[in-house]
Image (spheres, grey):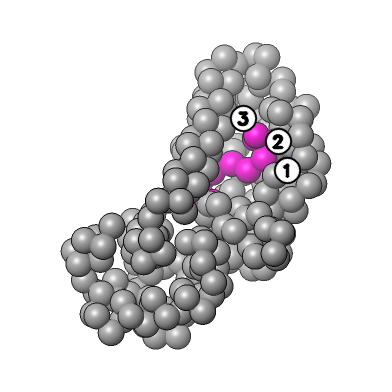
Amino acid sequence: MSKCEQCIVREFSAIKALKKEELLRIADCKTSYTIKKGEPIFYEGDTLNGIYCIKDGVCKLSKLSDNGKDQIVKLVKKGELLGQRSLISEESTNLSAIAIEDMQVCFIPKQEILQFFNENNQFSLNMMKSVCGDLKDADDTMVNLAQKTVKQRLAEVLIKLETEFGIHEDGSLKIQLSREEIAGIIGTATESCIRLLSEFNKEGLISLLGKKITITNKKELQRIL
């Protein structure tokens, strides 16, 4: 078996529709990278000539606003793809992808992906479903920013981080984000985020130890939503 046949990305992305011979073609043409924490996979406005498979690690998809604030649209984890919207629309990237922990990433050239579109209908459908899912996430983010309070958004994000990324043995969230990054997700100033986290800590909803965050009363945290 090729490594692509065993890769976690195949289990959770459009690539699961590819046949054995197609996976072998990917293995022959892909390029693998190690992306260090804080390094970009690509920047907003870049032209992509293929897609990225996230083999390990987490990155943030974000957009820089006119006032210089970094609005985080989505956290992308292992098993997901990056760049499919730009590839299909033939437009430059609308967001930046920056690693928030060390990552293992594979790049598959555009020419190979487009050939799969022509040869494999299920792959095409899966890819379109993935793009539609990203659009839905963007819609949900926009509605949350417009309709929910900052306190509600913070509670929701903390619960989501635990659900999607898990916890360490000590109960703390596996994914460690800076206060600035959490603020970028919930769409508020870093100072406001710090103040709300402190309030949650005093109320016994969470505990804080440096960057570590532990949800200690999930039921009460959910009542805020």
Residue under pointer 2:
86
Q: Cα distance, mark 1 to mark 2?
A: 6 Å
Instruction: Say left or right for 209 vs 128.
Output: left
The kind of residue on which mark 2 rests is Ser
Residue under pointer 3:
23
Q: Cα distance, mark 3 to mark 1?
A: 26 Å
The kind of residue on which mark 3 rests is Leu
Query: How dense is the environment of label 3, judged by Cα within 10 Å: few (below 14), some, or many (20 and up)?
Result: many
Instruction: Say left or right for 192 vs 97.
Output: left
Decide: marks 1, 2 in contact (CB < 8 A)? Answer: yes
Query: How dense is the environment of label 2, judged by Cα within 10 Å: few (below 14), some, or many (20 and up)?
Result: some
**Foreground disc of the pair 2, 3:** 2
Residue 156 lies in quadrant: bottom left
Which numbered dot is residue 93?
A: 1
Residue 55: percent from left, percent from top: 57, 50
Which stretch appears magenta?
A: 76-85
Residue 150: percent from left, percent from top: 41, 64
Q: Secondary structure at mark 3?
A: helix
Against 172, is 202 above or below?
A: below
Against 130, is 201 above or below?
A: below
Comparing 158 with 151, the one in front is 151
Quadrant of the frame with the C terminus: bottom left
Query: Mark 2 or mark 1, which is nearer the start of the sequence?
Result: 2
Q: Residue at x 78, y 47 (%)?
A: 45
Residue 209: percent from left, percent from top: 39, 85
The kind of residue on which mark 1 rests is Thr
Residue 170 lies in quadrant: bottom left
Instruction: Say left or right for 162 vs 54.
Output: left
